[in-house]
Image (cartoon, coloured by chain):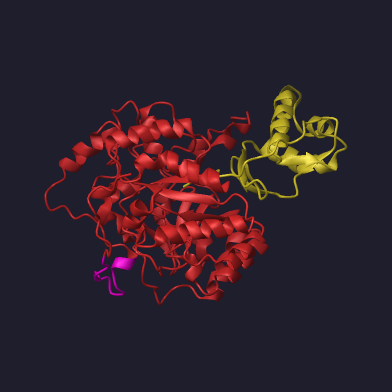
Amino acid sequence: MPADSALPLQTVPLRQQFTHGLDAPICLTWELTYACNLACVHCLSSSGRRDPAELSPGEARGVVDELAAMKVFYVNIGGGEPMLRPDFFDLVGYAVDRRVGVKFSTNGTRMTAEKARRLAAMDYVDVQVSIDGALASTNDTVRGEGSFAAARSAMDHLAAADFGQFKISVVVTRENATQLDAFARMADGYGAQLRLTRFRPSGRGADTWEALHPTGEQQRMLYRWLRDHPDVLTGDSFFHLSALGEPLDGLNLCGAGRVVCLIDPIGDVYACPFVIDREFLAGNVRHAGGFARVWRHSDLFASLREPQSAGACASCGSYDACQGGCMAAKFFTGLPLDGPDPECVFGHGEQALAARRPGIRIPVLGHSKVDVHGQPIAVPTPIQLRSRARL
Amino acid sequence: MSLTEERVNTPAPAFDPEGAWRVHPQVALRDESFGALAYHYGTRRLLFLKSPTLVELVSALDRYPSARAAVEAIVPVTERSKYSRALARLAASEVIDAR
């Protein structure tokens, strides 16, 4: 967090302050719809079908009003594919008019020249286009046939519209971890910013994590690459790598329920975008008191703001650096939350994975994998992974 | 999730404590128990004002003829140099600008 060092007044240890939560989130993700025209094999929200109970345009505006009143400076909009919502532009305009900035993620398939110009004309709007391979073959294996071309076309439209510095957003996988320099060149070519984020075993990612998450050697390489490329954005998502030495830029702390949360398309509020599961459901914006009440008074968030036990990590000298890693990564691999991250750089996670009891129930039934009665529905993973893609 | 993903900054003019300052019109402050968060809608930078006194000082800048006058009115003598340096950093981040 480069901005953090901008002030010398260390009257309060800020990290400690953050662990107790803030009056409003700093980093709020709002998934506008579960509808998506792609079916990426790692989709954190298992998106595909629109949920009939999604917030209406009026309700969505009500959420914006509330965020504005809470002085939430900006909201990270995702999905599903947010541009599939018929009121997408209305809602973005409504938000920025109320000084709630919008940073939205798109797969690019609906980005036309005209829409790119429209976005370029709006203040307080940032766009990130998702792409998961520097080559079409690497990307399309994960995101679907033709998705690389669609993403590049969206980037071309944004560049032609003089949008300015859009972002190219990459989930680092075993297949693309060798392409980081190529992604950086792609971003440079557009005058864009590269953003790398961590692959979590959430949503459909639970089904593909085993095959797709970066190897230990790739993680060490990634850490060095990120240290060498401080301008590359990471969403603070690789803090488990900070145990390797000098910390990466960022908070180096799980922000779930403290500074981060998710509003899903039906108004459910979860502790973070990567834990769409009943266990981490804090409330719903449709209930009395709305989002502010959930953020400030939910039992779940109160418990997440308590000091967390280091558990099995207590004896590790690097606990202060990595804080035990990512809650979602542990939860969806069936590991205890007070133990090592499955991708612990010292291999403790691999040992913990190997030591899981046979038959342990690993939670993989997030919102869009169950019907209204809570029964599992088949959400196919339509794209078969090939064996290792190569550059 | 990122807390400070930001656009590349252009350098701001140097801080002159004798000049008149204000909160930058593109900056919003949100009070928190430790002080306040400051968000710059232009640069997309998020900063932390880590003491209530600093928040009071920054918010009061536009009522004083100079930054020095605001510091002298609000900050105890022993702390003034520290707070002046903080203002210089806030000027560099464009949280405050010359009026």
Which of the two residues, B35 or B90, is positioned nearer the viewer here? B90
Q: Residue at x 73, y 33 (%)?
A: B87
The image position of residue A324, as x and y in percent, is 34, 37
Q: Colour of chain A?
A: red
The image position of residue A295, as x and y in percent, is 49, 56
| Rendering quarter of residue B19 | top right
Q: Is residue A307 magenta?
A: no
Q: Residue furthest left?
A: A358
The image position of residue A210, as x and y in percent, is 23, 48
Please provide the residue range marked out in magenta: A368-380
Q: Is residue A331 above or below residue A84?
A: above
Q: Residue at x 48, y 41 (%)?
A: A184
Q: How many marks?
A: 0
Which of the two residues, A46 or B61, is positioned nearer the viewer here? A46
Q: Residue furthest right?
A: B65
Query: Can you see residue A107?
Result: no
**Please, what is the dominant secondary structure of the magenta stretch?**
loop
Q: Is residue B99 above or below residue A291?
A: above
The image position of residue B91, as x and y in percent, is 73, 36
Query: Can you see residue A390?
Result: yes
| Rendering quarter of residue B78 | top right
State which chain is coloured yellow. B
**Where, quadrant-wise, is the C terminus of chain A in this rendering?**
top left
Q: Residue at x 48, y 38 (%)?
A: A251
Q: Is residue A377 magenta?
A: yes
Which of the two residues, B90 or A71, is positioned nearer the viewer here? B90
Q: Is residue A183 above or below residue A10?
A: below
| Rendering quarter of residue B8 | top right
In the displayed structure, does residue B93 sit left or right of residue A60? right
